Image (cartoon, rainbow, N blue to C red):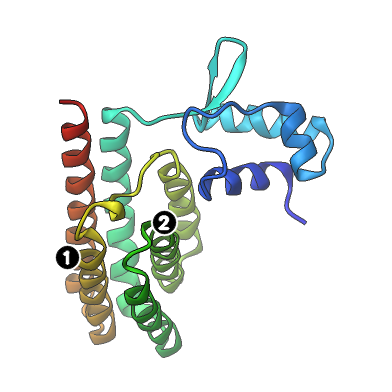
């Protein structure tokens, strides 16, 4: 059974609790069927990780500002590029087939941005696992946990879903060929495009 910390993180990651939502100790304990003590400890841990923050006397799910977003994408790019390079060397045929099947399945859900976003996270996690480096996977888990603090998915932007899947395909083709440099370059391009899409959306919203 998952502990209170994992349950709350999963709820944030799935969008059950979105940036700006209040996290009430008693409500969380009741929702997850645990006592308030582990919930209190989990919230304290999340606060030290900047995933939740104080708003008066309340705790709310944190929101990333522009600088935090940029910093997060910088770290994500470097770590995922390393994962892609290692995956080109270490991925098994079975792992490559799973990655390809994920793309094939995702093509059927282009109209559902939220489902596509969930699948996108699974796709990237599969690449992390294919690197066969446990310490890298752990660090990327932290990065992607913080990605949940972005209220919207860039895949909701018109045309971005189809473009993202084309980028996923380029990554997988490089992995299949065992070309670490090409896999890294394809991964960097993919994240750069996602970041650019998000920045453009934010700029238009701020007008």
The answer to whether 200 is drawn above or below residue 85 in the figure is above
Disc marking residue 114: 2
Q: Please tell me whether residue 15 is drawn above or below residue 65 in the rendered image.
A: below
On-image quarter of the C terminus: top left
Label 1 CA crowd tier, 10 Å (few <14, some 14–19, many 20+): some
The percent coordinates of residue 1 (x first, y second) are 78, 56
* 40 with respect to 182 (left or right): right
Quarter of image, res 109: bottom left
Task: Say what secondary structure mark 2 lies in.
Answer: helix
Marks 2/1: CA distance? 27 Å
Please state the horizontal and vertical placement of residue 175, each as a whole percent of the image: 28, 79
x and y, in percent, of residue 144 in the image: 43, 50
Q: For this view, does 179 lie left or right of residue 60? A: left
Q: Nearer the viewer, mark 2 or mark 1?
A: 2
For residue 87, what is the image quadrant? bottom left
Is 37 on the left or on the right of 145, as rendered? Answer: right
**Figure check: 157 above or below 133:** above
Judge left or right: residue 201 versus residue 8: left
Residue that appears at 33% across and 71% down:
86
- Give neighbour class at mark 2: few <14, some 14-19, many 20+ (Cα, 10 Å): some
Q: Is residue 70 above or below residue 137?
A: above
Q: Furthest-front residue in view?
A: 111
Residue reaching furthest right? 35
Residue under the image location 40 percent in, 89 percent down? 93
Q: Residue at x 48, y 27 (%)?
A: 20
Mark 2 or 1, nearer chain start: 2
Q: Which mark is residue 146?
A: none
Q: Please state which of residues 174 and 7 is positioned toward the viewer in this rendering.
A: 7
Closer to the camera in the image, 55 or 141:
55
* Badge number at residue 185: 1
Q: x, y (%) of residue 122?
A: 45, 65
């Amino acid at each position: 059974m998952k502990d209170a910390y994992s349950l709350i993180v999963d709820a944030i990651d799935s969008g059950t609790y979105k940036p700006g939502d209040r996290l009430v100790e008693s409500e969380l304990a009741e929702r997850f069927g645990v006592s308030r003590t582990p919930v209190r400890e989990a919230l304290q841990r999340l606060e030290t990780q900047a995933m939740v923050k104080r708003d008066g006397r309340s705790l709310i799910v944190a929101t990333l500002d522009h600088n935090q977003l940029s910093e997060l994408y910088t770290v994500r790019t470097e770590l995922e590029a390393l994962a892609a390079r290692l995956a080109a060397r270490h991925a098994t045929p079975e792992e490559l087939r799973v990655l390809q099947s994920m793309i094939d399945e995702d093509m059927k859900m282009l109209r559902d941005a939220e489902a596509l976003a969930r699948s996108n996270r699974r796709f990237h996690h599969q690449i992390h696992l294919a690197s066969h480096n446990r310490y890298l996977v752990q660090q990327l888990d932290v990065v992607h946990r913080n990605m949940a603090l972005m209220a919207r998915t860039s895949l909701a932007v018109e045309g971005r879903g189809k473009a993202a899947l084309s980028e996923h395909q380029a990554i997988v083709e490089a992995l299949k060929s065992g070309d670490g440099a090409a896999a890294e370059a394809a991964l960097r391009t993919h994240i750069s495009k996602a970041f650019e899409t998000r920045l453009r959306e934010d700029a238009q919203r701020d007008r």
